[in-house]
Amino acid sequence: MNLKQYQKAFAYYKKSYLLLQRLYPAPHPKKAIMLNNMSLVLTYTSHLDKALTFAQSAYSKLEKFYSPPHPILAKLQNNINRILWLQKKYDLAEPFARKALSQAKNLYSPPHPLLALYRTSLAEVLYQNQKKQKAWKLNAEAFRMKKKLFQREWPILSTSEKIGQIFY
C-alpha cells in the first residue's frame, strides 16, 4: 500500500469509529478494535507516538471486556511491543513482548504460528537489550515451530527469524 491508501484507510477507520461511538455510547469492544486498526495504520505510516496512544487506549478498553489469556489481548500487547521496538524503546517493549508470549502459551499448543511470531518478537527485543543467548534460544524455537508448520524448507524461514543477527 502507498501513503494515500493508508490515509484513506485511516479516514475510513476514523469514520467507522465515530459511527460506533453513536451506536454504542457505552464502552464496547468494537470501538476498541477500531482504535487498534487506526493504531496499525499509524504504525505503517510511521506516526509512532500517535500509534502508541491508540494501541494503549485500545488495550485498556479491551481488558475491561476480556481477561487474560485472550487472543485479542495478546495481539494488542504484541502490537504495543512492536511500536515501542520501532521507537527503539526496547526496555519498555520487553514486558509487552513477554506478556504476549505468556498469554499465547496459555492459549495455543505448539507448533502454532502465533507462538512462533511472539517468540520472534520477544527475541528481537531481548537481542536489543543485550540478552543475546535468550534471544538465540527463542529464535531457534520459533524457527523449529515454523519448520514443523510448513513441513518443508522455505527460504523465508531462514530470513524471518533473524538468526544471523545474533552472530553479528
Image: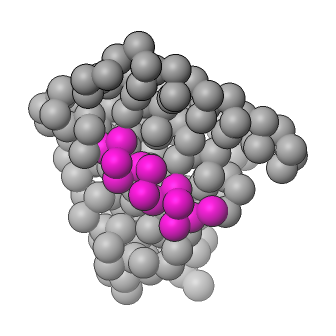
Image quadrant holding the C terminus, namely bottom right
- Magenta segment's dominant SS is helix
> In this rendering, does residue 24 appear at all?
yes
Where residue 32 appears, as percent x and y from the top left, is: 37, 33
**Viewer-proximal residue among 138 and 95:** 95
- Residue at 70 percent across and 36 percent down: it is 11
Is residue 53 in the magenta section?
yes
Task: Using the image, determine if residue 19 lies above or below residue 162.
Answer: above
Where residue 148 appears, as percent x and y from the top left, is: 47, 31
- Residue at 20 percent across and 37 percent down: it is 63
In the rendered structure, the answer to whether residue 167 lies left or right of residue 96 reads right
**Viewer-proximal residue among 31 and 65:** 31
Image quadrant holding the N terminus, namely top right
Residue located farthest toward the left when viewing the structure as drawn? 67
> In this rendering, does residue 105 appear at all?
no
- Residue at 44 percent across and 68 percent down: it is 84
Where residue 122 appears, as percent x and y from the top left, is: 37, 60
Where residue 158 appears, as percent x and y from the top left, is: 64, 53
Task: Using the image, determine if residue 144 lies above or below residue 22.
Answer: below
**Viewer-proximal residue among 93 and 35:** 35
Q: Quadrant of residue 7?
A: top right
Identify the magenta region.
Answer: 47-59
Q: Quadrant of residue 136?
A: bottom left
Task: Using the image, determine if residue 51 lies above or below residue 65.
Answer: below
